[in-house]
Image (cartoon, rainbow, N blue to C red):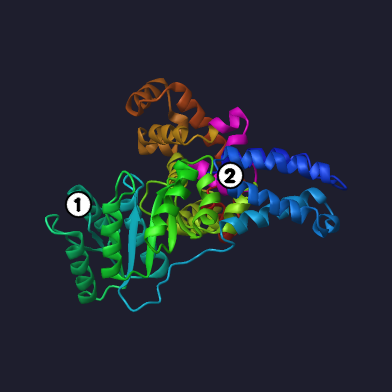
Amino acid sequence: MFDNLSKRLAATFRGLTGKTSLNESQIRVALLDVRRALLEADVALPVATDFIERVHARALGEEIGRGLDPGQTLLRIVQLELETIMGSENAGLELRAVPPVVILMAGLQGAGKTTTAAKLAAWLKREQQKSVMLSSVDVYRPAAIRQLETLAAQVDAEFHAADASRSAAVLASEALREAKRRFVDVLIVDTAGRLAIDAAMMLEIRELHEILEPAETLFVVDSMTGQDAANTARIFGRALPLTGIVLTKADGDARGGAALSVRQVTGKPIKFLGVGEKIDALEAFHPQRIASRILGMGDMLSLIEQAEREVDRKKAERLARKVRKGRGFDLADMRDQFRQMHDMGGFSSILDKLPGPGIGALPPGAASMADDRLLRRMEAVIDSMTPRERSNPAILNGSRKRRILKGSGTSIQDLNRLLKQYKTMQKAMRKMKGRSMQQLISQISAGTG
């Protein structure tokens, strides 16, 4: 996310960093580049214009004059203003109401609303230790009800079965009664989507709002639609008292215009980002962290939280003990490291949160090594080996290699690349022999090998 914007802003600020002073003309030229970058990222024009005016006013004040490095000071002003337009701080869910706390999910068809309802249930169970019931009142798409039932089982949430032959209002009332009967903490109600906002949709969801009296009414919108996402949320918000926005498919959005526009356009906070297809791929939205990510400063807090959630500590401890005792690092261990990276969203997700320009600015050779498809091919090669071959790759002769390539559907280049990468990681592991357990676990858990 934000790859294009990050690269444009990085180029702008590289030209300013290190200067002993900045005059008004230099500031104006720099901000003209920033404005172009924002518009190319599909940020709404009024939002981009207001943002540049505020940065310009602060830059011409005393702040630039006091800075030891004017370029860095201007960068800091841009960071603070980015945080401001996105909401300054994380807007959490209101969960202090008498249980069951009701969360009403609204949005257009295709935005990922049903999947987001399940992801939110998983987040509430994991992060807030809440018991959750999921219910669908989408009487127009029985398949959506079945989908939510399947997802509820995946996240180990309660599910209220709905009869699609009855009205959405009746189903909502029944779900609320059942949630009270089962003493659940949170009831998440998934509503019907439409291809466009229409009068019938607004009437139905207003009626549901009156029946359920939700503590949270979240509008789920596809971030890849850019400023249209903000405009749709604004129109919807006129008919319904929204409490927040969930931006889905953020991992596929290289521009980021929706994230930068939606708060200013709607007046409602972004509460979550959907960052992948996995059921736990939902992140609380932190404006400070997102601003740092946009400006190439990384998002180490989110990366650490993700590592704590995804890394298998038992496997990390086993590998740490093995390395510490000098018993060697084999291809099965290497495969475990690849899988840890997959669990954390892959190379691109990790690089996106590290300080620096991100995957888009890597040299071609380095970028190809950070390709998640390459990781999957190397993992397939290891899977096609016998346990003996994984523990001792030196025995791989011509016939063994042909069998492995046939079984994995890969090329000899993939196998050679794997063995070369393995030797590099093996050397790194040898250097770790004798280190403390905590040092080893820290490096292995971080996926650095």
Is 71 inside the magenta-drawn segment? Answer: no
Left or right: 88, with 258 as reference point? right
Q: Are marks 2 and 1 in contact (CB under 8 Å)?
A: no
Calculate the distance from the C-alpha at mark 2 to the C-alpha at mark 1.
41 Å
Query: x, y (%) of residue 186?
Result: 32, 70
Q: Which residues are magenta?
A: 345-368
Nearest the camera: 388 or 443? 443
**Residue at mark 1:** 146
Q: Is residue 9 visible?
A: yes
Query: x, y (%) of residue 54?
Result: 69, 54
In the orientation shown, which residue stands out farthest toward the bottom? 98
Is 358 inside the magenta-drawn segment? Answer: yes
Amino acid found under the numbered disc labelled 1:
Arg
**Residue at mark 2:** 45
Magenta stretch secondary structure, dominant: helix
Q: Earlier in the sequence, mark 2 or mark 1?
A: 2
Residue drawn at (50%, 52%), measured in percent from left and top? 262
Foreground mark, 2 or 1? Answer: 2
Nearest the camera: 373 or 72? 72
Vertical arrangement, residue 106 with respect to residue 25, above or below: below
Vertical arrangement, residue 259 with respect to residue 348, above or below: below
Q: Quadrant of residue 88?
A: bottom right
